[in-house]
Amino acid sequence: MPRGSSPKSERQYEHIKESAEERGESTKRAKEIAARTVNKQLARSGESKTVSRSSIQDMSSSRRGGQRSNSGAQGPTKEQLYNEAKQKGIGGRSKMDKAELKRGLGH
C-alpha cells in the first residue's frame, strides 16, 4: 500500500489480498490484485494524485464482479444476455425472451 493511505484502504487491501490467496493465487499475484483494486477505488473517489482514464471511465471492480457471478441455477440474466447480444450485433433482440436470446447467442 502507498504511504499515507487510510486505515480503511489498508483493511480493504488486506481483505482483498487474503481473498485472492484463498482462491489459490500466489502471494505476489494476490498483492498485485489487492493494490490495483484499492488504487482504482481511490482514483475514482478523487483521493489519488494521478488518475488514468480507464480508472474513471470503465466499470467499477465491485460491479464487474457482480456481473460475473452469473453461474447460478438459471445462468446469466436476461439483461446480461441482451447486452451480450447487443455487443455481437444480433438483430431483433429487443423482442426476444431469455430463451431466444440464449439460442441466438449459442448458449
Image (spheres, rainbow, N blue to C red):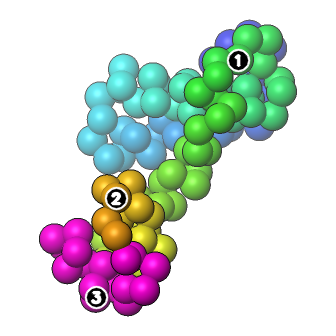
C-beta proximity under 8 Å, tags 3 and 2: no
Magenta span covers which residues? 92-107
Left or right: where 60 falls relative to 43: left
Crowding at mark 1 (Cα within 10 Å: few <14, some 14-19, many 20+): some
At label 3, which amino acid type do we have?
Ala
Does the magenta run of residues contain 95? yes
19 and 46: which one is in front? 46
| Lower sequence index among marks 2 and 1 | 1
At label 1, which amino acid type do we have?
Val
Q: Which residue is mark 3?
A: 99
Question: How far across and down, in percent of the image, does residue 3 sit?
Answer: 74, 10
Q: CA distance from mark 3 to mark 2?
A: 18 Å
Q: CA distance from mark 3 to mark 1?
A: 42 Å
Q: Which residue is mark 1?
A: 51
Residue positioned 51% across, 61% down in the render: 66
Report the residue that reaches farthest toward the left: 106
Residue positioned 74% across, 33% down in the render: 44
Residue positioned 36% across, 39% down in the render: 21
Question: How far across and down, in percent of the image, does residue 43 sit?
Answer: 73, 26
Q: Which residue is mark 2?
A: 89
